[in-house]
Image (spheres, rainbow, N blue to C red):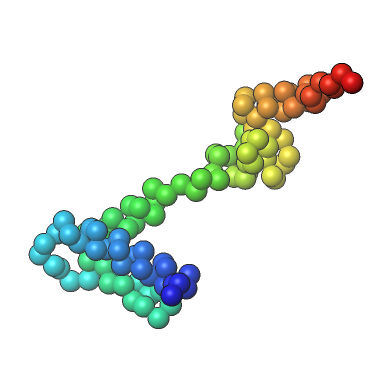
């Protein structure tokens, strides 16, 4: 049976805690609990610390930095800003110039 989205989160969190707890054989008390749906996952101090560090270290694969012009955080695959519509950085400028010069594939002779 497939897990619901909240069950998937709870299970991932439980597995994360288990992976960290293995390095600390003397179990201490839980210092935090995270409730996800119907489940509560207790976190001991080393797990809580590792979880906070993991959250801070996460970078979304869609995060391409900020726009050079407006500082907006939403750059597309071509480094064009979704907020101001301008290409960001040298790479974005090069892509836009190259796209402007592109005339499409040559016609094949009959
Ligand atoms: Zn912008």
Tally of numbered tags = 0
Q: Residue at x 30, y 63 (%)?
A: 15
Q: In the orientation shown, which residue stands out farthest toward the front?
A: 110
Residue 83 placement: quadrant: top right
Would you place residue 26 above or below residue 90 in this image? Answer: below
The image position of residue 47, as x and y in percent, is 25, 61
Residue 69 placement: quadrant: top right
The image position of residue 10, as x and y in percent, is 38, 70
Would you place residue 14 above or below residue 81 in this image? Answer: below
- Answer with left or right where residue 8 lies relative to residue 90: left
Q: In the orientation shown, which residue stands out farthest toward the bottom?
A: 38
The image position of residue 100, as x and y in percent, is 78, 25
Would residue 78 be seen by someone viewing this image from the given angle?
yes
Residue 6 placement: quadrant: bottom left
The image position of residue 75, as x and y in percent, is 63, 41
Q: Residue at x 84, y 21 (%)?
A: 108
Q: Residue at x 79, y 24 (%)?
A: 105
Q: In the orientation shown, which residue stands out farthest toward the right?
A: 110
Quadrant assignment for the N terminus:
bottom left
Would residue 70 be seen by someone viewing this image from the given angle?
no
Would you place residue 67 above or below residue 104 in this image? Answer: below
Which residue occupies the foreground of this view, 100 or 51? 100
Q: In the orientation shown, which residue stands out farthest toward the left?
A: 26
Quadrant assignment for the C terminus:
top right
């Amino acid at each position: 049976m497939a897990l619901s989205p909240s069950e998937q989160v709870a299970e991932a969190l439980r597995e994360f805690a288990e992976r960290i707890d293995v390095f600390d054989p003397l179990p201490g008390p839980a210092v935090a609990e995270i409730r996800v749906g119907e489940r509560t996952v207790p976190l001991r101090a080393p797990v809580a610390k590792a979880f906070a560090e993991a959250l801070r270290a996460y970078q979304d694969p869609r995060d391409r930095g900020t726009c050079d012009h407006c500082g907006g955080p939403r750059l597309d695959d071509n480094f064009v800003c979704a907020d101001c519509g301008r290409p960001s950085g040298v790479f974005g400028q090069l892509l836009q110039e190259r796209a402007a010069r592109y005339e499409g594939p040559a016609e094949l002779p009959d």
